[in-house]
Amino acid sequence: MSNQEEINIRRLSGNIGTEITGVSVSDDLTNAAFDTLRRAFNDHSVLVFRNQNLNPEELVSFSRRFGPLERHVLKQFSHPDNPDVFLISNVREKGKPVGAIRAGQYWHSDCSYMAKPTMASVLHALEVPSTGGDTMFTSMAAAYDELSESMKALLSGLRAVHDYTNAWDVFFSRVADRPPLSEEERAKVPPVEHPLVRTHPDTGRKVLFVNPGFTRHIAGLSESESRALLGFLFAHAQQPHFIYRHRWTPGDLVMWDNRATWHLAIADYDMNERRHFHRTSIAGDAPY
Ligand code: SIN
């Protein structure tokens, strides 16, 4: 049993991320302990827990405390014994990748291309390369706050189109090991439109809700207007003071709020070294 009294919270950077100690997430968390974690999650957007020894069922049951889980469109990368666990991995068996290889090597928020984008993702590191393979997170709430009032007024009321296949146009088409989506997969993820600025349902904060991986264009603007405005917003959100960079150790469990952040997996490691993670996805609501 993990109690609220044992939980310590240490901020990891000025705008995003906190490390939680005194909790073993596979324990039965008391309601008070869980409330402390939920508050920290809403306040800091990224929670880091070290030394978590978890099997897939324990990862799923911890994740479910935050809400119902959803499954990824790439079904072939589900954990063979537990379809709620998605494998992010560069490991190959019989020549085939066992998990989503090169997942998230571009800034994005998970599944923003769905009508109800993923609320939170929980990533558990099992094997990590000896050097590199960090993940960066940026605060889209802090990025919004820092815009001028005139820019906020310009953005208010705009909507943007998100499309999973955009990730192939901007990234996957340059790498050999990620085939395009099948017709059946593509049919499950048609482009969707979301407000460009969303309101975080738990904190009430305004958040910039466009990302380089999945946002195709801003509705109602010309191609060049949309490209220029998205280009500015993408560069703005990548400033170092909005970012926390996580260096992985096996046993780390990191969860993030896709309603308020982007993340990027840095592809700077030796692909012959194993990087093997389990991920769960907690379902979200339609942005407003
Ligand atoms: C992802 O969920 O986008 C993958 C993150 C990572 O592998 O670090």
Image (cartoon, grey):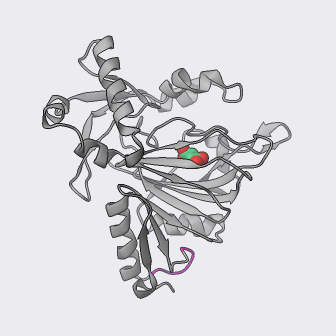
Camera-side residue: 29 or 69?
29
- Region rendered in magenta: 25-29
Does the stretch in magenta take in 196? no
Res. 174 image quadrant: top right
Coordinates of residue 111 in the picture (x, y in percent): 45, 40
Coordinates of residue 55 in the picture (x, y in percent): 66, 67
Res. 197 image quadrant: top left
Camera-side residue: 262 or 285?
262
Q: Is residue 181 above or below residue 281?
A: above
Q: Is residue 124 above or below residue 49?
A: above
Q: Which residue is depicted at the point 32% across and 48% down?
A: 285
Q: Viewed as shown, does residue 83 lie left or right of 273?
A: left
Coordinates of residue 265 in the picture (x, y in percent): 57, 43
Q: Is residue 286 visible?
A: no
Coordinates of residue 47 in the picture (x, y in percent): 46, 63
Q: How many marks?
A: 0
Q: Is residue 260 visible?
A: yes
Q: Viewed as shown, does residue 128 lie left or right of 6?
A: right
Q: Of helix, strand and loop, which mostly describes the magenta segment?
A: loop
In the picture, the quarter occupied by the C terminus is: top left
Camera-side residue: 151 or 70?
151
Camera-side residue: 33 or 191?
33
Q: Which residue is depicted at the point 65% across and 61% down?
A: 249
Does the stretch in magenta take in 27? yes
Residue furthest right as drawn: 94
Q: Viewed as shown, does residue 57 lie left or right of 224?
A: right
Q: Which residue is depicted at the point 36% across and 57% down?
A: 14
Q: Which residue is depicted at the point 30% across and 43% down?
A: 143
Res. 229 image quadrant: top left
